[in-house]
Image (cartoon, rainbow, N blue to C red):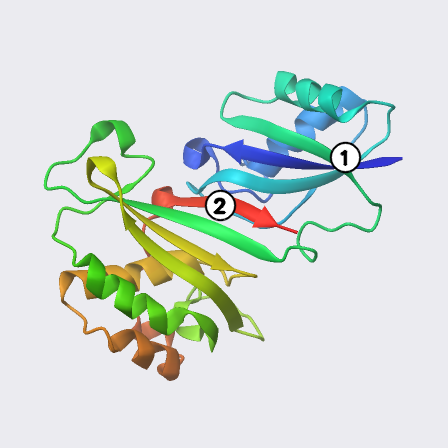
């Protein structure tokens, strides 16, 4: 039996997240339904990460066993023919039997987009956080340096989530001013806590507005207290950009 790795993009607007839920439309559910139509049997997929309601993906990695004789190109075409138009399989490759998309991941990259303008852009309202107040990008970059490296990110986890080990490593954070009033915050790390990237964005925005000093980010890491941190940035600005193995 073959094992395939699929690189999947999806628009998270009309999904209740990635992970399968009863009586809810999720990315996992529609992919498994598509595979069931192709294979004529139930198939369970595993992914390199879970995304919340409204979060998008450019390069989510999904793995599944293939019980029929089919090449990777034909598998890609068959899946796309059976998926809804807000999910697209970009690539499929064959992997070894022991490959796991979560545990074999060496680097995950998330992109977060802010639309920094006094007036909203209705056409990107589901794809970037409209933030109408002035932001000091250079201060945000300086604050982000405190987050790079290995730290206890308890202050940046989902408030009601229980996690025994809250230490994570961030390789790099880049903040880039783009065309059309867009700001990209790119976060690279091996793995992340629930809501960690969105909580980082919320904190950096506080620095950007001048409400917080740059040193506040360092203090938050030392406090290890989610209640002292900033509000979580909206989900629709976040993208699971890619994963490296």
Instruction: Kindly check if marks 1 and 2 are in contact, taking CB atoms under 8 A apart as contact.
Output: no
Q: Which image quadrant: the N terminus?
A: top right
Report which quarter residue 76 is drawn in: top right
The circle drawn on residue 226 is: none
Tell me, yes or no, if residue 241 can be seen here: yes
- x, y percentage for residue 104? 70, 56
How crowded pointer 1 is (Cα within 10 Å; few <14, some 14-19, many 20+) is rated as some
- x, y percentage for residue 158? 44, 63
Report which quarter residue 217 is drawn in: bottom left
Q: Compared to 218, does 31 lie above or below? A: above
**Distance from label 1 to label 2 (Cα)?**
23 Å
Q: Compared to 38, does 203 lie above or below? A: below
How crowded pointer 2 is (Cα within 10 Å; few <14, some 14-19, many 20+) is rated as many
- Residue that appears at 57% across and 56% down: 107
Mark 2: secondary structure: strand
**Residue behind mark 2:** 240
The circle drawn on residue 43 is: 1
Q: Nearer the viewer, residue 118 or 90?
A: 90
- x, y percentage for residue 125? 27, 34
For residue 100, side relative to residue 150 (left or right): right
For residue 152, side relative to residue 220 (left or right): right
Of callouts 1 and 2, the N-terminal one: 1
Q: Residue furthest top?
A: 81
Mark 1: secondary structure: loop
- x, y percentage for residue 105? 64, 55
């Amino acid at each position: 039996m073959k094992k395939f790795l699929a690189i999947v993009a999806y628009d998270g607007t009309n999904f209740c997240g990635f992970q399968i839920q009863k009586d809810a439309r999720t990315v996992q559910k529609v992919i498994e339904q598509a595979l069931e139509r192709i294979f004529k049997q139930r198939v369970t997929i595993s992914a390199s990460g879970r995304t919340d309601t409204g979060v998008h993906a450019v390069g989510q990695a999904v793995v599944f066993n293939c019980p029929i004789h089919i090449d990777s190109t034909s598998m890609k075409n068959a899946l796309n023919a059976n998926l809804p138009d807000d999910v697209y399989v970009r690539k499929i490759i064959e992997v070894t039997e022991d490959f796991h998309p979560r545990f074999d991941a060496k680097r995950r990259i998330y992109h977060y987009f802010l639309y920094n303008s006094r007036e909203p852009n209705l056409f990107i309202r589901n794809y970037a956080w409209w933030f109408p107040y002035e932001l000091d990008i250079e201060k945000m970059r300086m604050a982000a340096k405190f987050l790079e490296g290995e730290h206890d990110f308890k202050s940046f986890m989902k408030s009601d989530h229980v996690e025994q080990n809250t230490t994570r490593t961030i390789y790099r954070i880049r903040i880039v001013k783009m065309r059309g009033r867009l700001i990209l915050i790119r976060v690279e790390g091996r793995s992340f806590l629930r809501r960690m990237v969105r909580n980082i964005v919320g904190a950096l925005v506080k620095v950007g507005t001048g409400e917080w000093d740059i040193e506040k980010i360092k203090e938050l890491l030392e406090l290890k207290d989610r209640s002292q941190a900033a509000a979580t940035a909206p989900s629709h600005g976040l993208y699971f950009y890619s994963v490296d193995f």
